[in-house]
Amino acid sequence: MVGKVDHIGIAVKNLDEALKFYEDILGMKCVDKEVVEEQKVKVAFLPIGDTEVELLESTEENGPIAKFIEKKGEGIQHIAYRVDDIEKAIEELKEKGIKMIDEKPRYGAGGAKIAFLHPKSTFGVLIELCQRD
């Protein structure tokens, strides 16, 4: 079902400060930034090998990333796996008894179709399915 790790989402309080670390210290390069209004998040993309690091800063105090940081602190928020057909993947997971946060795909950063699995079904890990056309 999954093809590869598409990206690792990391929640940060300050995107610019986090980028200084990833670029100046680790030598990675930000190739794009985007605001996803629907998810109340500002995103920076840092490719590495066949995957990328996705830094996520909340654009609103009550956004999902702000709530995550308030509860757990900054750090890895989700792991995204690439799928070829997200609708089919969602149906297969539901048939296998996996609880979904998103039962239908929604718009994600970078123009991807995304859907999240509920961490109660994935041993505490927030997993995102990601389809890129």
Image (spheres, helix red, strand yellow):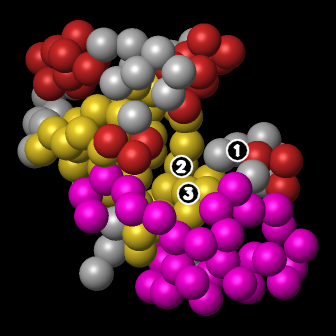
User: Mark 3 or mark 2: which is in front?
Assistant: 3
The reply to whether the C-beta atoms of the residues labelled 3 and 2 are less than 8 Å apart is yes
Q: Position of residue 53 (x, y in %)?
A: 33, 42
User: Start and end of the magenta stretch?
Assistant: 82-111
Q: What label sits on residue 125 in the rendered view? A: 1
**Amino acid marked by disc 1:** Val
**Residue at horizontal 66 percent and vertical 77 percent from the top:** 90
**Residue at horizontal 60 percent and vertical 24 percent from the top:** 68
**Circle 2 SS class:** strand
Query: Which residue is at the front of the view, 11 or 2?
Result: 11
Q: Which residue is mark 3?
A: 128
Placement of 124 over or under 5, stated as above or below: above
Marks 2/1: CA–CA distance? 8 Å
**Amino acid marked by disc 3:** Glu
Marks 3/2: CA–CA distance? 6 Å
User: Mark 1 or mark 3: which is in front?
Assistant: 3
